[in-house]
Image (spheres, grey):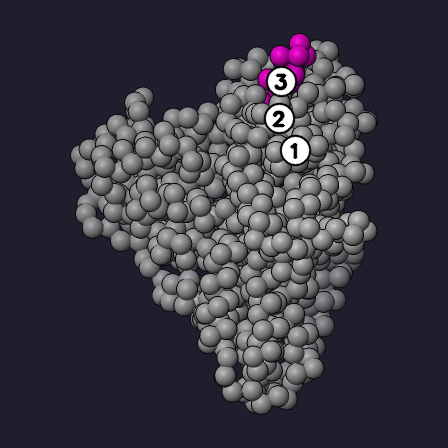
Amino acid sequence: MFDTLSEKLEGVFKTLRGHGKLTEQNIKDSLKEVRRALLEADVNFKVVKQFVANVEAKASGQETLRSISPGEQVVKVVHDELIAVLGGQNAPIAFRSTPGKLLVCGLQGSGKTTLCAKIALHYKKKNARPLMVAADIYRPAAVKQLQVLGKQIDVPVFHVDKKPPQICEDAVEYARANNLHPVIFDTAGRLHIDTELMDELRNIKSKINPDEILLVADAMTGQDAVNVATQFNETLDLTGVVLTKLDGDARGGAALSIRQVTGKPLKLVSVGEKLSDLEVFYPERMASRILGMGDIVSLVEKAQETIDVKEAEKLEKKLRKDTLTLEDFYQQLQQLKKMGSLESILKMIPGVSSAIRDVQIDESSMKRVEAIILSMTPDERAKPTILNGSRRARIAAGSGTSVQEVNRLLRQFEQMQKMIKQMRGGKFNKKMMPGLFPG
Amino acid sequence: MGFSLKKLASGLLKTKENLVSKIKAAVGLHKKIDGALLDEIEEILISSDISVETSTAIIANLKEKVAQRGIDNSDEVFQLLRECLKDLFVDISTEPFFACNKKPYVIMIVGVNGTGKTTSIAKIARRFVNDGKKVTIAAADTFRAAAIDQLAIWADRVGCHLVKGQEGGDAAAVAYDSVQSAIARGDDVVIIDTAGRLHTKTNLMEELSKVKRVIKKAMPDAPHRTLLVLDGTTGQNALQQVEVFKKMLDIDGIIITKLDGTAKGGAVFSIVERYKLPVVLIGIGEQMDDLDEFKAHDFVEALFT
């Protein structure tokens, strides 16, 4: 639905290429597009105004660079300015005391309860002993929800039948007595205009004196994000903001608005339904996302994190000797899978995100390929040539697929081997490895 | 039925203050209708979460009306804009929602996470129960932790039947059972809750269309309503949600919740302008009777008076 800002600006500057300087007029033209792009990304219009004024000041008079088009140059100024406003650097969660106390608040449906479990899991993985506190006594089954999540990640959940401030106070005692740290407080969703419930939050704060008070904001929030953030910040003096549901396709301009009006850092982002889908906030990535530019940094990092270097070297050696087996192919698939869904990986590549918006990626075809390979004996995986008709029929039955599908996979595999033979002449580039999967 | 104008006006107070008061102020500053005034109005529309596209379309319509009638006094812009907003709803179906002309009347509720599906269902069910109808609720959100418990508590409070499965179980099976058992019991209404899912998750969207297909096996013309629940505080992404849910599920109406909490109730206009989909219900508060039928005329009137 939205063109990226870069595409739009290309249009504006098509006729202007070759001019020596960014003139006042062509900056003005492009800033109109910048303004629109930011509005479409849900950045608050007041924030947009100020932001655009800053960009204008920075862009005017700049010499155009030979290597990039004027459009790209304006995008760069915008991008840099976005990064500057979004925070410059990331701000980690910090606990001043033991047990550390982290209070989570926000509107209804922003994703507080799930976030609590995600944060708890994060600390559990670091060998801490977190405690979650169920202080939402209003929404039916909210306590149960946290308890179920607690069971899933094996983290205790504290709840007593009292008012929320009292629950929280008791929880701190409980954590101290049982040597649990950090303590994560889940509170009820509330409207920022609901004075009674906002008072309750203030009360909780004064009872437990939290180290971190995080506002949870839905990345899809519109223009009103500013009012919400202002109210919560005035009531509680937040220490930071968490953006949720970033696995959707909202541009997340709310991030910019919230940051601008509260001055509080964005600390974490929540990027999926799995409880492990929690990431640190990076201003550069958010800036790219708001402008619809893809997120190549995240992609590279994900690849580095998940692709086992030793495995990769082993495979490279094999490829050089032309002994790629189906077993290797399977390992390769597993590496790719660790990076997330194929769709999420593709979305991070600049330019691809808009192109694949309507393309359906069939994740299950990958599963079928896996099933087929897993239904083979080690011998068969090493030497696919021995796969005669009856073996293929057995594999198809074993994997719940058809002989045709088995044949197709083998054909693709053969082609791949041929390709590798051709490549062996030149230099083999490690970075090409994720591409082995025949899309 | 629908809300009384008074109640609507108080629920939409923030939007009203944001949208209408600002336009009034802008009009006050300009004597004549000119480009600057129209630009300013367009900006005010956008700042109410009306999409950029729809705002442009509204302004175009406004310009046309100004030219046609040869108006140049800015005072009249206000009335014209009111007309323009009402114009958006002209071709939209206004079938009453609570009429319930099928038995059972099957309603499927879908939406992204956290928009208020479960709470809306409780409110809808209560309304039907108050009208003397027998209601079955299907807890087909088998994904979110304790979603079934949440709905069970509501079913108990409201006084209706609940059909549920196991957490992590097959949503389609729950939906199917609910329609079948409602037919067997002679219930009047079936409301099916589904797990929230982001519209970008293709496989989860596929699962929803499966739920819909399976419902048809229990009752061929069901579901009679497939409604998308949108969070009133959502910005421009609301349109993307409508687009994908419409494509995958052929939704035939929208419920917009939490309109009282936002000063930006503009999504209503964008959805109608772009997708010609009726907004069926709106939520303007946390009380049980704060969800009711949407009436375009009243909605615009409540904002402008």
Q: Write down the quadrant of residue A227 in the picture.
A: top left
Q: Which SS class for mark 1?
A: helix
Q: Which of marks 1 and 3 is nearer the N terminus?
A: 3
Q: Write down the quadrant of residue B158 in the picture.
A: top right
Q: Which of marks 2 and 1 is nearer the N terminus?
A: 2
Which residue matches tag 1? Answer: B301
Eye-nearest disc, 3 or 2: 2
Indicate the amino acid at tag 1: Glu
Question: Considering depth in this image, is A20 or A147 the residue closer to the camera?
Answer: A20
> x, y (%) of residue B145?
48, 33
> x, y (%) of residue A385?
71, 68
Task: Name the residue at 66% across, 23% down.
Answer: B2
The answer to whether residue A417 is above or below residue B97 is below
Eye-nearest disc, 1 or 3: 1
Q: Which of the labelled discs sits on residue B5, or is there none?
A: 2
Which residue matches tag 3? Answer: B127
Quadrant for the N terminus of chain A in the image: bottom right
Residue bounds of the magenta highlight: B122-136
The answer to whether residue A21 is above or below residue B276 is below
Q: Which of marks 3 and 2 is nearer the N terminus?
A: 2
Indicate the amino acid at tag 3: Arg
Question: Can residue B293 be seen here?
Answer: yes
